[in-house]
Image: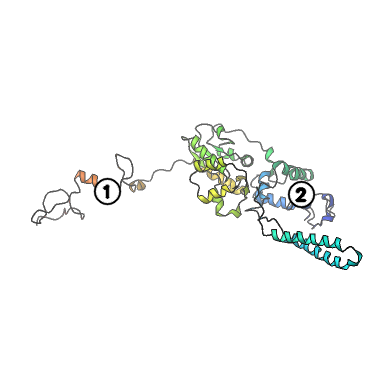
Amino acid sequence: MICPHCSKDLLQRQRTKRRCSYCRKHFALDPKLDGAGLHDVRIRKLTGKLSDQGRLTVTAGQLVFALQHRGRPPQRFRGEASKAAGLIVPGLIGLVMAVAVIDLGLAPLFLGVALLLIGLGIRQLWLADQPAPDTSVGPRWTADEFRTVVLERWRAVYGALPPGLVDDALVRPGPPPAEPAFALLCPDRTVLAFLHANRWAERHRALLVPELRAVPAGLPLVVLHDASPQGHLLAADARAARPGPRVLDAGLSVRTVLVDETRYTLLRDLHRSEDLRLRLERTVPELTGSQRAWFAEGWWTPLAALAPKRLMALADRAAERITAPPAPRDPAALRAAPVRSPAAGRPENPLETRRRALAVGFMTWPEPAADGTPESGGGGSRPGGPDLGRGPA
C-alpha cells in the first residue's frame, strides 16, 4: 500500500501497527487487515470523486456502495483448478517418496497420504466445472460495521472525516418549510440524509418523508425508490392512495438498469415471498417478461448506489417537473385532433362521419334516371366539389 503521508510504497513488514517505517506516522486503514481496497489514499480519492471535488456532501452509506462490486458478481464454482494442482503435486511427490523408502517399511504410510492427496485433487478438478449454488448478495458492510472499521478509526487518526464525507446518523434535517411546494417520498434513509446534507429540501421548498402515510393530503408528490419490487409497488400504492393530487414516479426503474447491468450495483435477495411476486404482477402490469424474470431471480439495485451527482440531478429534475405549470394547449394541435362524436365523446371513425353526413343531406349524389341522364335533384356534388363558377350551358 501507499503511505498517505510520504507516498512510499509499503510492504507488510514496513507498516506494522498501522505505522509507516519511513515517516513514522500512523494511518487509518490497512488493506491486509481491513479488507481489499481499503486504504487511506483510495478513500480520499473516492470521496473527492463522489463529492464532485467538494461541490456535494456525500454520506458514508454512499461510500459503502461505491466500494461495492458493480454488475453481477463473478460466477462461483464448487472446485478450483489451483487447489487441485496444490493437492496433486504433493501427492505425486508422496508416491516417489513411497518408492524411495520401500526398504524402510514406511512405504504404506507415504502411499496412503499420496493417494489421499491425489484423490482430493481429482475431486477439485471434477468440481471446477460445477457451479456453486446461488447465494444472496448484500452490501459489503452494514452501517455499524463500516462506522467501526472505517469512520471511527479515521477520526481517531485524523480527527475528522475526509472533506465532503458525513456520517448518515449525524445528519439532522432542517425545519420543514412553512408552505411546502410538494412532498418527496423516499424510504431510503441514506438518500434522505444525502438530500438533507445538501439542503435540497430548502432549495425546492420540499417536505421529505420516509413513509406514504406521513405524506400530507393535498400536496403533489414525488416518489424516489430503488429498482426493486418494493420500490415499484411503492409508486403504484402512492398513485392508488392519492387519486386527486399529482404523483410523479421519479425512482430508479428496472428498465433503466437492464439496459446495462455493469453500470449499477446489483444486490440479490433469494428469500422473497411468493405473495410479493403475485402482488407485483397484479399491481404493476406494465412490467415486461424479462423485467419480471430479473426480479424473480432476486436481483435489485439500491437508489443510494447511484453516483451522488447523478442522484442529485435526478432529484432536481423531479422537483422541476412537479412544480412546473401545466403547458398551454397548442391551437394547432387542437385543429389536428381527431373528429369526436358529440354523443360518445370519443374519436369517430370515417364510417360514422359519412353516415351522419348522409343523414344531414350535404353528401347526396345525383342518381341516374331511367334513360341514363343524371337527375337534377339532390343538393350535393361529386367529390370534385360544386362547379360554382360555370354559367348555364
Is the residue marked by circle 1 packed among few (<14), some (14-19), or many (20+) residues within 10 Å? few
- Residue 140 in sight: yes
- Residue 83 sits above or below residue 100 on the image: above
Nearer to us in this view, 224 or 74: 74
Task: Spot the residue most to the right.
Answer: 104
Q: Nearer the viewer, residue 310 or 350?
A: 350
Q: Which amino acid lies under the numbered mark 2 shown in the image of this protein?
A: Asp
Query: What residue sits right under mark 1 in the picture?
Result: 351
Rendering coords of residue 259 (x, y %): 55, 54
Indicate left or right for 323 with 304 as reference.
Answer: left
Q: Nearer the viewer, residue 198 or 169?
A: 169
Residue 128: x %, y % from top left: 69, 59
Task: Give the label on residue 18, or none.
Answer: none
* Residue located 67% across and 44% down the image: 61
Residue 304 lies left or right of residue 32; in this view the side is left
| Image quadrant in which the C terminus is located | bottom left
Question: Is 239 on the left or on the right of 306, as rendered?
Answer: left
Quadrant location of the N terminus in the rendered image: bottom right
Where is residue 230, by image quadrant?
top right
- On the image, which quarter does residue 192 sit in? top right
- Answer whether residue 86 is visible to the viewer in this image: no
Q: Earlier in the sequence, mark 2 or mark 1?
A: 2
Measuring 84% from the left and 55% from the top, which residue is drawn there? Answer: 13
Secondary element type, mark 2: helix
Tell me what residue is drawn at x 59 percent, y 49 percent: 297
Residue that carries the numbered disc 2 in the rendered image: 34
Please provide percent x and percent y for residue 302. Answer: 61, 46
x, y percent for residue 290: 53, 51
Classify residue 371 as left or right of residue 19: left
Three-letter amino acid code at the position of disc 1: Leu
